[in-house]
Image (cartoon, rainbow, N blue to C red):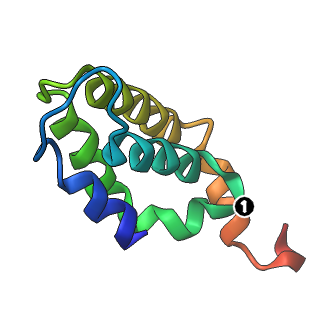
């Protein structure tokens, strides 16, 4: 998780064109998948503040691919915070015999 977060923090230090693969974009897409994985919601919960900051910072990027990934990541985080998502995380944190 720390490698993905550090990759996202290094936004736009190089010249970019439309065909450049941006590691930040790939890292944000992986974070998006991790945030939405029901089995990992307990493990990723402690990183949500930093992931949210990364997605908001991405909105100001001059690179469209980063802005796009940031918007998609932010949208998934909003779904995570939605009240429908919360029971899933609470259920996974309970001991098995309580479920």
Q: Residue at x 89, y 78 (%)?
A: 97
Tell me: 20 left or right of 96.
left
Tell me: 26 left or right of 37.
left
Between 30 and 85, the one lying in front of the other is 30
Q: Position of residue 29 (x, y in %)?
A: 48, 41
Between 42 and 7, the one lying in front of the other is 7
Q: Residue at x 71, y 61 (%)?
A: 39
Would you place residue 49 above or below residue 29 in this image?
Answer: below
Q: Residue at x 20, y 55 (%)?
A: 9
Residue linked to disc 1: 91
Q: Position of residue 34 (x, y in %)?
A: 56, 53
Tell me: 57 left or right of 88.
left
Between 15 and 41, the one lying in front of the other is 15
Tell me: 55 left or right of 38.
left
Q: Position of residue 24 (x, y in %)?
A: 32, 46
Between 82 and 32, the one lying in front of the other is 32
Q: Position of residue 84 (x, y in %)?
A: 62, 36
Q: Residue at x 43, y 39 (%)?
A: 77
Could you say which quadrant of the image residue 99 lies in? bottom right
Would you place residue 90 above or below residue 60 in this image?
Answer: below
């Amino acid at each position: 998780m720390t490698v993905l977060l550090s990759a996202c923090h290094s936004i736009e230090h190089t010249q970019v064109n439309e065909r450049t693969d941006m590691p930040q974009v790939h890292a944000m897409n992986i974070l998006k998948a991790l945030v939405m994985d029901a089995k990992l919601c307990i493990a990723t919960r402690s990183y949500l503040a930093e992931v949210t900051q990364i997605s908001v910072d991405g909105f100001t990027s001059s690179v469209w691919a980063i802005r796009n990934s940031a918007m998609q990541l932010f949208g998934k985080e909003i779904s995570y915070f939605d009240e429908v998502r919360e029971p899933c995380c609470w259920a996974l944190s309970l001991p098995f015999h309580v479920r």
